[in-house]
Amino acid sequence: MPEIPVIQQIEDVTARMMDDLQRALKKPPSERRWGMVIDLTKCTGCEACTVACKAEHKTPPGVNYNLVIKTEMGTYPNVREIFLPRPCMQCENPPCVEVCPVSATYKNEEGIVVIDYDVCIGCRYCITACPYGARSFDFGEWYTMGTPEIAPYETAPTFEYSEKRVRKDDASPIGNVRKCNFCIERVHEGLLPACVTTCVGRARLFGDLNDPNSLVSEILAERSSFRLKEELGTEPKVYYLT
């Protein structure tokens, strides 16, 4: 049987996820359960996901929604590097929600943990409560700070949390906590999260965990997986394949 070219495999996987996405969007929001599956055997540590996320959300210095944690294992000469992509885990039982004194961070009807920038008071309790280090504080810094002017791309509007928002001067989200939201503004437009579309190894898969016919559900049924810090009872919706 002839081997399927890699580029075709990537196109087939993307098309499948897009079909799953369209099917999920036809359901009431409360019946969806968005989840992500990350195949650690395919992650190359290229950090394209990190770059794509920063470009999508125009995040400032120190604010990173998607990181790739790198560590070495073994003893010379048998040493290998391990890559662990880490978005927000979108917990079923998010500890960050419990500690917010003003209910600025909450879980929406689709199960996505979101932040209301207009309510957030910047206390940062949620940063301390998150066991995954998935939250950052926006201190109002710019990559072009100290130059004659702030570059236009840094103040261009974004559509984070489905709301057009311009970050400048002391306007939100400056002074707020920020984090990954599974690119829900893209998902509602029928697009996959930026990190998923940009992954060169197709290590990231996204879809509706409530749909047994979705790619993410089928993969989890076929292969062994784990979730980070499951013993805490947070019930993350990000699964890792090994």
Image (cartoon, rainbow, N blue to C red):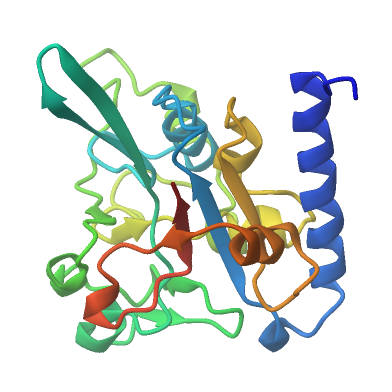
**Residue in the image at 27% along x and 61% along y:** 176
| Camera-side residue of 186 and 5 | 5
* Residue for point 33% across, 57% down: 178
Count of marks, rendered view: 0
In the displayed structure, does residue 53 sit left or right of residue 35?
left
The residue that appears at 30% across and 62% down in the rendered structure is 228
Picture coordinates of residue 195, whole percent (x, y) = 55, 40
Name the quadrant of the N terminus: top right
Q: Name which quarter of the figure residue 94 lies in.
A: bottom left
Q: In the image, residue 75 lies at what x, y percent? A: 9, 22
Can residue 163 be seen in the rendering of this structure? Answer: no
Residue situated in front as seen by the camera: 107 or 1: 1
Q: Quadrant of residue 200?
A: top right
Would you place residue 178 above or below residue 3 in this image?
below
Res 161 visible: yes
x, y (%) of residue 12?
Answer: 84, 37
